[in-house]
Amino acid sequence: MAKRIEVSDLNIYYGNFLAVEGVNVSIEPRSITALIGPSGCGKSTFLRSLNRMHEVLPGARVEGKVVMDGQDLYGGDVDPVDVRRQIGMVFQRPNPFPTMSIYDNVIAGNRLNNKRMRKSETDELVEKSLRGANLWNEVKDRLDRPGSGLSGGQQQRLCIARAIAVEPDVLLMDEPCSALDPISTLAIEDLMGELKERFTIVIVTHNMQQAARVSEQTGFFNLNGVGQPGRLIEFNPTEKIFSNPDQKATEDYISGRFG
Amino acid sequence: MTATKAPTEPPSQQRVVRRPGDRVFAGTAKGSGIFILLVLAGVAAFLISEALPAITASAEDVPGGEGLGHYVWPLIVGTLLGAVIALLVATPLAVGIALYVTYYAPRRIAAAMGYVIDLLAAIPSVVYGFWGLAVLAPQLVPFHQWAADNLSWIPLFAGPASASGRTMLTVGLVLAVMILPIISAIAREVFSQAPALHREAALALGATRWEMIKMAVLPYGKSGVIAGAMLGLGRALGETMAVAIILSGGGAATLNLITSSNPSTIASNIALKFPEATGLGVNTLIASGLVLFLITLAVNMLARYIVNRRADFSGAN
């Protein structure tokens, strides 16, 4: 299932404003790729461009190529809706649908893809996805209760269960732990370690320790100043980024000298 | 550790700092709350005390000569019929308009449309009445005829068709136009407040725009739409002028929408009969007003019940 994403010469615009410039990167399957950098450097914008979620904002567009296992995600005949069905996303703030039960939240994506599923199939899928998100034991007795009644960490794992229930090729995570306490964060990080066996994972994080703990590859984004486009300064194995980065700016950032 | 220290005096005797601004605000808020309850109680007391003679009077003294129930029943049917037609026509239309304005229309068109629809609410009901009488009713005559010819197996269209178009159907449609701005304004407001968080969650799962609306916008806005529909229903139930102008009234209770012998509605009947009513006639009209009051109350309580039934899932928690 996990697929490789090749990004070449990607420029991302909001209207006339160039937000991210000239990104070239290859994201490996069955691994975790972390994106770090100061606020406003375009790492979230870049992440959202991978499943065309940035197009939710009017005027957003890209130049360049994003290719997933040979399929150009920005090809003329590609529907962003199909892209998002293959590339799942977990957001900064947990966002289970408040009007749906836990059960319905998990299968929300599957209901979109194929309308008719037997009850036994959905039961199985819900259990599998919730087990996959390490949430099954905590919620198995209250699947018919609203997802909004769970704690923040549980809600976030519910969102992960919802995202993996549709068996995506890639899982994007936009600061998935920044609204969570350290224990919930640890639970999510452990979960990411398990999920990378099956999915390609890209995570944006402000927490450099987290990037160092969970990821195989790390990309460092930066910008020269306000109003300037963000750039991918360095992309290397995580170990190298945190011990012996190629770029001075990367070293300054991870050693806390700025940002 | 202040938390573990025993209090030096019972909490009830502790001096609580109360700022004058807080006190004034709390007082005004409390006063407003009590005031509205007093007004409501006053209206209810007036209605009941004035209606009592008609309720207790013997059947032959009540206008019509067959008792209060017999007098009010056709009016209740007429009132509910007109209001329900209006609600059934206006609600889907209002939801559609609200969704178009909030999620489909280009921004400029959306703003312009918003103004135009709000303008509908500013038209006086007398004007609606004349429009219904002079424009809509004649236009609807062919439809009345067609319905009587082809749909007469449905009790609602049993016929015979009215030649003037001054029927319950026309009234219902005029009322629908009148309550459209109320429902669509409230629906627009709640739809536009559907959290971006949940809209993005739906889109990220691969929802199309319509699926996103079904997953994240409509469930969120449902209670608001119900509230708006109930406000609209309240207006339709109580609408007086437009109905009084269009309907000839006076007919017996019937579900037949297209005949010219329709029952009137409670409000328009009061407006038409009140100037010439004397004695027990006045009490009878007020008793019918009490019935309208109770119907509106019941409708609102029902709406509240529907909204609260799934409060856990409302997204408000």
Image (spheres, rainbow, N blue to C red):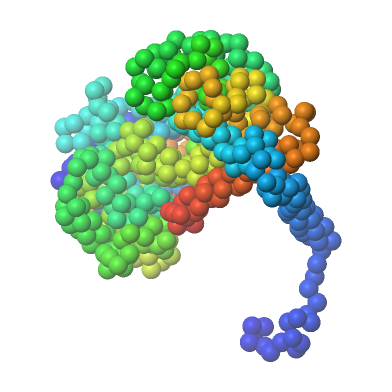
Residue situated in front as seen by the camera: A149 or A95: A149
Q: Residue at x 29, y 33 (%)?
A: A81
Residue in the image at 46% along x and 26% along y: B256
Instruction: Describe residue B123's horizontal placement relative to residue A95 as left or right.
Output: right
Residue sitting at 34 percent across and 24 percent down? B153
Q: Could you tell me residue B302's position as x and y percent?
A: 52, 49
When asked about the image quadrant of residue B296, the answer is top right
Q: Position of residue B315 (x, y in %)?
A: 46, 51
A44 vs B56, nearest the viewer = B56
Quarter holding the N terminus of chain B?
A: bottom right
Query: In the displayed image of the protein, which residue is found farthest to the right?
Result: B20
User: In the picture, residue A214 is in which quadrant?
Assistant: bottom left
**Tally of numbered discs:** 0
Q: Position of residue A178 (x, y in %)?
A: 43, 56
Residue that lies at the very extreme toward the front in this rendered image = B60
x then y, percent, for residue A146? 39, 57
Q: Residue at x 16, y 55 (%)?
A: A120
> Can the viewer see residue B268?
yes
Q: Tell me if B240 is positioned left or right of A32 in this view.
A: right
Residue A222 visible in the snapshot? no
Tell me: residue B108, above or below residue A176.
above
Does residue B49 appear to the left or right of B152 in the view shown? right
Seen from the viewer's position, the closer of residues A244 and A104 is A104
